[in-house]
Image: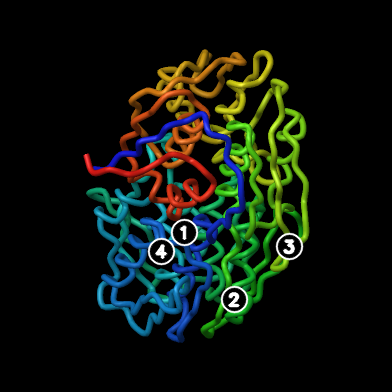
Amino acid sequence: MQKFIVTGGVPLHGDVRVAGAKNAVLKMMAAAALTDEPCLLRNVPRISDVMIMRETMADIGFNVRRVDGDAVEITAVDADWLFVPLEAAMKMRSSFILLGPLLTRFGRVIISNPGGDRIGRRPVDLHVEAMTRLGAEVEYKNGYYFASAPRGLRGARIEFPYVTVMGTENALLAAVRASGTTVIDNAAREPEVDDLIVMLRAMGARIERTAPHRLEIEGVERLSGAEHRVIGDRLEAGTFAIAAAATGGEIRIHGVRPADLGAFLEVLKRMCVPFEEELGADGPVLRVGSASSYRPIDLETRPYPGFATDLQAPTAVLMTQAEGESTIHETIYEDRLDYTTELCKMGAIIEVVDERRARVAGPTPLRGREVEIADLRAGATLVLAALAAQETSVISGVEHVDRGYEQIESKLVALGAQIHRIDA
């Protein structure tokens, strides 16, 4: 186990480049299983979730290797073992994204019920229902889904009762090689979903977004290999933007499309956080500064293009410095306010009204304390709080941060932060 030691109260300044999007790259790695030709992904972050997916796909029998620094090449010629074990599922919920591509290409798969962060139930019933709509037979027993499609998958109409990002992606990955046409209604609109579609089209898939929440897929018999560059991680970019405002500094963020951060930037605007978009030598740059005071806000998470649930907890740190009471309404996951217990240890005044609503009083000084990370976004939240706090904090559970942030402490140190990692 490792810990972060953070001495806060230092304004952060400088330039930072975000890594490739975690929520895109894992799905693209799974997409490589749709073909026996090599797929090359660039801008792949060095995070533990990518390592777990690499190991899981290698165990199935695929050739997965790092090349050229930030690139990963995947060649899925054949599968020796169409099985995704409990160990992989407990470490990373996204391993369930292998259901669709393995089923549509190989006709069968055994996959464990997923684990992942402790932020609510996040059931996979909608994934399974989508597979059955496409003609699969799925049986659940002893913690595993046994899925088969001996006669292949066939196109169908899939309508999700509510927006599910990974459910949309699993259905999409299954439909691209199903016979006939598939229509997915109430499909997710996240930038990571559209980036996956860009990759699949490069592989020869026929996909059209015919309405904001509708995808139409004409199945093809075979897909080819492709080379694709993963988009920048908008959630990492949001984390560094909050770091600038919460510490009283200014940070220039490279490697992300500001257009993908629309709802988040609108929240920064409402809170009076100064920011502007610039054109750098290699693309857009988002410059985020700080102000002497911030306005409180009422925040509600929504599927994209609404405010991202993954940025709700980090934004709560900035709310503690606002002049008045802010409110949070979490509409996506029912347990995503658990981080508030640790944040209150550091001096925050937060009243959790119920499992989805909270009130945050401000401004309140944050103090260094010994706290524990429970999940990935809570980890980023506590790091941000420690950077804004006076005194020194000791943060355990660093492995959760490593799941989604590439070398976060070295990036923060380059911005002037006093943070280092120790073995506990």
**In the image, which disc is placed on residue 219?**
2
- Circles 1 and 3: CB atoms closer than 8 Å: no
Which residue is at a point 44% across and 59% down the rendered structure image? 97
Mark positioned earlier in the residue sequence (1 or 2): 1
Crowdedness near tag 1: few (<14), some (14–19) or many (≥20) residues, C-alpha within 10 Å? some
Residue at the spot of label 4? 98
> Where is residue 255 drawn, in percent x and y?
63, 60
Q: What residue does disc 3 label?
A: 280
| Three-letter amino acid code at the position of disc 1 | Thr
Tell me, yes or no, whether the two marked residues, 3 and 2, touch with CB atoms within 8 Å: no
**Real-space CA distance between mark 3 and mark 4, rounded to the nearest whole angstrom:** 37 Å
Q: Secondary structure at mark 2?
A: loop
The amino acid marked with disc number 2 is Gly
> Up-down: is 332 above or below 52?
above
Q: Compared with residue 159, is residue 273 higher up or lower down, i.e. above or below?
A: above
Q: CA distance from mark 3 to mark 2?
A: 40 Å
Q: Position of residue 126 (x, y in %)?
A: 49, 49
